[in-house]
Image (cartoon, grey):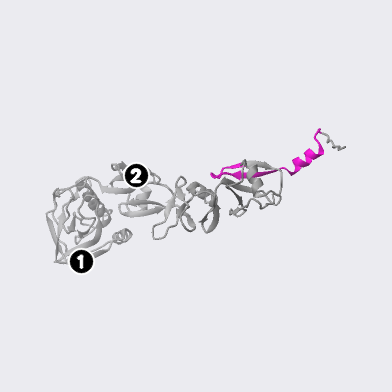
Amino acid sequence: MQTTTSTGDGRTLAEDVGAAIRHTIDVADQTLTYLQVSIDDLTPTGAQLAIAAGFKSVNGVSVLQVLANGDLEDVRPNETVDLRSQEMRFVIVESDRAYRLKIDDQRFDWPCRIVSGGLLRKLGQVPADKAIYFERQDQPDRQVDDHDLVDLDAAGVESFVSRKLVWKLNVQGVVLELSAPTIVVREALVEAGFNPDQGWHIFLKIVGQQKQPVELTTVIDLRTPGIEKLRLTPKDVNNGEAPVMPCRTFALLDIDEAHLNRLGLKWETLVEAERRWLLLHDYPLPVGYTVAHNKVALEIPPTYPGAQLYGFYAYPPLALSSGRVIASTQLRGVLLGAEYHGWSRNRGPAAPWDANTDNVVTQLALVDAALAKEVDE
């Protein structure tokens, strides 16, 4: 006759032993959402782990052990793991194969063909201040946001890398690379080398939208889709003709050279028939002209910056895609044997030239405003 021994709380000794060996493990599905699962065997097989996770059959079930260093290791149906050695975590999903991938050179076997950016971030323990990029040959690396999906079925090992997030903002041709996703307009102008107290009309350009006027105190969120640039226009600019100052001497300010170098433009200073010129090669034009780039020249007066700059010159003569004639481009200048057409674009009386703050930098802002106005940008 078999006897059982009772404990003080009414349970049998066998029940106490069973309770003593019951173990709790963390099990995640394909979304990497972890739930606690109880299992009686402290050295279960992969098949037992799958059944404990709720699968009725182990056929087509993939069991991955999450190692201490974050790697995923496949546990075969008849392979055992020792739950007594450390706290265990597993990913258990239905899958007919494992897909191999790398995150920052760390290898993972993932049981699903599709993986999201959010899952990659969880797998690789990538912090929030870094972006994840899908490395590709012969193409730029593709940024993978948390909700983006990547198909792992291509040949080879899919490789991902994390990089510090960099937010870019084009301020009148100067591209800022920022570590934070927001910036105040005043700070953006200062970082781009512009005097925020100059007296600007400031517009935020977003792809597919009308340009939006902003103030120096406006906060720009660079996470907004389609942000293109901040455009600056000197206040009270008109399109009337103005006399061209004779040019006899030449002076280029340090701030001008620094700005031109930041823009990455090829520029030269030339003397033609006693006229001094700043020549800019491959100057970018807004959409709406028959060309995307052109040569642009500024004539520099002999007493610059005491004397103001007037308009600008272009070669070849600029034309609109619409065929409309551009007004007030009757000025002429000859550089290196080519005839440049001058645009008479100068400042109105409410915003006269200020020798203390105006220079080539502010004049190029006027150039960009005049070019954009002709195409209603």
Relative placement, left or right, of 153 versus 21 is left
Tell me which corner region of the image, top left, top right, bottom left or bottom right, holds residue 33. top right
Relative placement, left or right, of 215 versus 42 is left
Residue 28, position as x, y percentages in the image: 58, 44
User: Looking at this view, is 204 or 97 the one in front?
Assistant: 97
User: Looking at this view, is 113 or 101 the one in front?
Assistant: 113
Q: Secondary structure at mark 1?
A: strand
Residue 22, position as x, y percentages in the image: 72, 42
* Numbered circle sitting on residue 216: 2
Q: Which residue reaches farthest top?
A: 10
Where's the N terminus, which quadrant?
A: top right
User: In the image, what residue occupies the spot 54% across and 57% down?
Assistant: 106
User: In the image, what residue occupies the spot 64% across and 50% down?
Assistant: 77
Does 27 lie within the magenta span?
A: yes
> Is 206 drawn above or below residue 134 in the view shown?
above
Residue 255, position as x, y percentages in the image: 31, 59
Instruction: Tell me whether the residue at label 1 lies in contact with that at label 2, contact meaning CB atoms closer than 8 angstroms.
Output: no
User: Looking at this view, is 14 or 339 the one in front?
Assistant: 14
Q: Which residue reaches farthest right?
A: 1
Bounds of the magenta span?
9-35
* Numbered circle sitting on residue 270: 1
At label 1, counting other C-alpha atoms closer than 10 Å, the crowd grade (few under 14, some 14-19, many 20 or more) is some
Q: Secondary structure at mark 2?
A: loop
Three-letter amino acid code at disc 2? Answer: Leu
The answer to whether residue 202 of the structure is visible from this angle is: yes
Residue 114, position as x, y percentages in the image: 48, 48
Three-letter amino acid code at disc 1? Answer: Leu
> Is 271 drawn above or below residue 131 in the view shown?
below
